Image (cartoon, grey):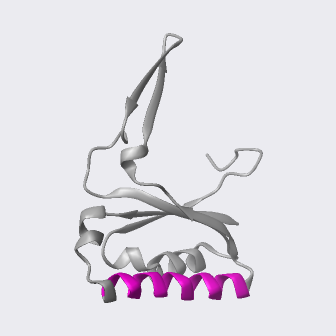
Amino acid sequence: MKYILLIYNNPAMLASFSKEEFDGVIGAVDTIMAELTESGEWIGGEGLADSSQTRTVRVRDGVPAITDGPFVESKEQLAGYCLLECETLERATDIAARWPDASFAAVELRPLMGQSGTEM
């Protein structure tokens, strides 16, 4: 089964980290990514640019309305994602719990729908 980890963090909190704390988070990410690559569970992932570069697009009655910034106004923002292929939901949950951002923000775990969309 394929899963996506949606990684949330608070940019202000990250900015308050010391260099050592920040480097520790990056090191922990590198470690878990290497482990998942080795096990064949890593499909891919990316960090997202700062939310100040975000646009939200809605189309109502055929008319696009475009606003700057993310839709949700909160301190925690979607910061990146990882795509995984795991044998079980429990394994994917274990990985989500070990992702560094889970210890100071949040990681959301969702199964990906297949082409048939029967997972809805």
Q: Which residue is at the far front?
A: 19
The x, y position of residue 55, in whole percent, is 44, 36
Image-quadrant location for residue 76? bottom left
The residue under the point 30% across, 71% down is: 14
Residue 64 drawn in magenta: no
The residue under the point 72% across, 86% down is: 39
Q: Which of 51 and 92 is in front in this view?
A: 51
The residue under the point 49% across, 10% down is: 61
Q: Is residue 20 visible?
A: yes
- The secondary structure making up most of the magenta span is helix
Q: Is residue 23 left or right of residue 45?
A: left
Q: Is residue 2 left or right of residue 32?
A: right
The x, y position of residue 11, in whole percent, is 30, 63
Q: How many labels does the image show?
A: 0
Q: Nearer the viewer, residue 113 or 103?
A: 103
The x, y position of residue 27, in whole percent, is 48, 87
**Quadrant in which the C terminus is drawn:** top right
**Quadrant in which the N terminus is drawn:** bottom right
Q: Is residue 80 above or below residue 74?
A: below
The residue under the point 77% across, 46% down is: 115
For the record, the magenta segment spans 21-38
Residue 26 drawn in magenta: yes
Q: Is residue 5 visible?
A: no
Q: In this view, does 34 lie above or below 80?
A: below
